[in-house]
Amino acid sequence: MLEDKNQSRTSLAELGEFGLINHITKHFKITHKSTIKGVGDDAAVIGSSDQQTLITTDLLIEGVHFDLSYMPLKHLGYKAVMVNLSDVFAMNGEAEQITVSIAACETYTIDLIGGDTTSSTKGILISVTAIGKANKEDIVYRNGAKETDLIVVSGDLGAAYLGLQVLEREKQVFKVNPNNQPDLDNYTYLIERQLKPEARKDIRPLLKEMDVKPTSMIDISDGLSSEIMHICSQSN
């Protein structure tokens, strides 16, 4: 039987990132009682006791998430850990272990417990999995938002993006004149936010100290508006 060459196809651009994730995962069924939360939040939640385990994975790909012409390898390792720890903290949890990357383990008291190495046909690819814990009653999901809730962000927004703009601009200048030495003293804070971000480990104890449990939480790596849309969508 000949293959039908005129099949209709949906382009990725048409679906968008979040549409694609929904399309792939909407038929996933949870079969184990110990899987409390699967796809759809900052981290998965598993465990049948009062203390539950949080698991999250992020991928960093050269040419998509980082440019080695201005990203030092030690910062790259650190950032690969941060983007994962941030997802655990966004569940109001405490991060404890990771697989794969080593650079930030000491600062955040995280144990490196495993990983894998393989060859790549094009550039560096880093996959990190972070594991954390939280008491069942402390975990905050994306789906608890209510009408009239306050929208609160930790820290400032946009600094990492501006840092990227500065680095990209200096890269273009360097291409034109390799002898030119960039003067980045005025942009130290912005560049640090891009190359060496910190996960908000301080938020969980701060909330506890204030006796506040948010109705909903999310890691804001994709931008304010899209993350609020996630919360609204999950919370109906």
Image (cartoon, helix red, strand yellow):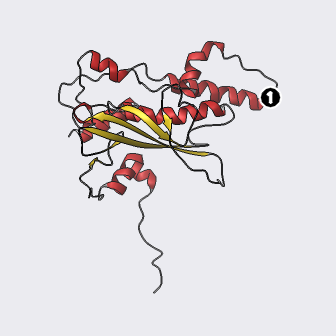
Coordinates of residue 123 in the picture (x, y in percent): 65, 47
Drawn side of residue 175 relative to residue 15, left or right? right
Q: Residue furthest bottom?
A: 1
Name the residue rendered at 50%, 22% in the picture.
159
Q: Residues within 10 Å of mark 1 (few under 14, many from 20)?
A: few
- Callout 1 amino acid: Pro
Label 1 sits on residue:
178
Q: Quadrant of residue 135?
A: top left
Q: Residue furthest right?
A: 179
Drawn side of residue 195 relative to residue 220, left or right? right
Coordinates of residue 202 in the picture (x, y in percent): 39, 20
* Residue 21 in view here: yes
Name the residue rendered at 23%, 53% in the picture.
33
> Of helix, strand and loop, which one carries label 1?
loop
Q: Residue furthest top?
A: 186
* Residue 221 in view here: no
Drawn side of residue 73 relative to residue 206, left or right? right
82 vs 43: above or below: above
228 vs 4: above or below: above
Name the residue rendered at 75%, 32% in the picture.
175
Residue 90 vs residue 233, the one in the foreground: 90
Please give the count of numbered marks on the rendered protein.
Answer: 1
Residue 173 vs residue 25, the one in the foreground: 25
Coordinates of residue 19 in the picture (x, y in percent): 36, 50
Name the residue rendered at 56%, 26% in the picture.
196
Coordinates of residue 177 in the picture (x, y in percent): 79, 27
- Quadrant occupied by the C terminus: top left
- Quadrant occupied by the N terminus: bottom left
